[in-house]
Image (tube, grey):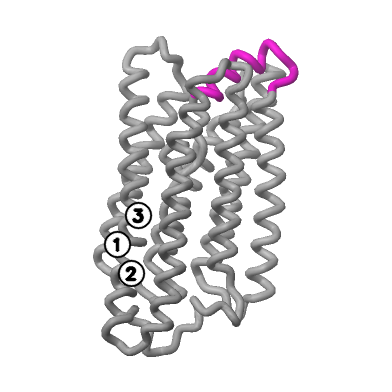
Amino acid sequence: MHAYGEPNLIHTRFACKIGLVADDYNPSSVGVQAAFILFVVAGVMWSAVVVVARRNAHRIHVFMIILGLFKALTLLSQFGMFHLIRTTGHPDGWNIAFYIFTFMRGVLFFTVVILIGTGWSYMKPLLGDNEKRILLFVIPLQVFAEVAIVILDENSPAVRNWFTWRDVFHVVDIICCCAILFPIVWSIKHLKEAAETDGKAARNLVKMKLFRQFYVLVVCYIYFTRIVVYLLRSTMSYKYIWLSDAAGELATLLFYVLTALKFRPHADNPYFAVSAEDVDV
């Protein structure tokens, strides 16, 4: 997983630039196509849920739809890039589309996780100063990470400073992952304090349970995609690297689906049953 909250495909894309030219069949290309179909299906289903329950939907649900769209576009452009490299030896502009969609998806991923963690739109209408600082901290890091990903992808490890940019990339990745956990922790702490003081202990404890589950989900996702997937990629031969990336994509899909299920809009969802006096939560 890289700084955009998705599986790290730097090494795989570099290898595929060699492998796709020499072989008409490449598991990585097939895997990207399958992932694209799965994310499109999931995105359509989520969009249908939001439309059907639009009276109970919030702005964060729309942001989640847009995130799913850019994830699908990223996979589509990546598949187009693989296809052209295999047939012509050059990406012919698909790599530019891939970089653009990857950047947008990366910014949206961290933004959506931070907004969900703060309870924005479904628990409170505005962000606090601390949440704004986190966003202003993470988004510039995403711009910097995009520069690193372009340099890594457009050059080979033989190029000078390639490994330096790779190390910078991983440092930025870790910083972004740590940053998105703070808003969730703040929300849990705030709900715990509110449950002890405002006389609405039952409601706030239910919300606190949701945020604790979301915190565990984010931590598990980060651990799997940064440690488990990395170890798989490091220990596998080139022929089987696609398995590590497939595992990362499946983990991403599972994370998206579980997050959508926990925060889906419907009238009976106790987490969204917020009265007017709860706006300051």
Q: Residue flagged by tag 3: what amino acid is it?
A: Leu
Q: Residue at x 59, y 50 (%)?
A: 254
Label 2: which secondary element: loop
Q: Is residue 140 above or below residue 197?
A: above
Q: Are marks 1 and 2 in contact (CB under 8 Å)?
A: yes
x, y percentage for residue 249?
59, 40
Give the labeled residue for mark 3: 181
Which residue lies under the disc numbered 2?
Answer: 127
Q: Image point 74% across, 17% down: which residue?
A: 24
Give the mark nearest the N terminus, 1 or 3.
1
Label 1 belongs to which residue?
132
Residue 19 on the magenta segment: yes
Q: Residue at x 50, y 70 (%)?
A: 59
What is the C-alpha distance between the residues marked 2 and 3? Answer: 16 Å
Task: Give the x, y percent position of residue 233.
Answer: 51, 25
- Could you tell which of marks 1 and 2 lies nearer the N-terminus? 2
82 to the left or right of 150: right
How crowded is the residue under tag 1: few (<14 C-alpha within 10 Å), some, or many (20+)?
A: some
Figure disc tally:
3
The span picked out in magenta is: 11-26
Q: Secondary structure at mark 1?
A: helix
Give residue 129's position: percent from left, percent from top: 25, 66
Q: Residue at x 42, y 14 (%)?
A: 157
User: Which secondary structure lies at badge 3?
Assistant: helix
Say above or below: 82 vs 203.
above
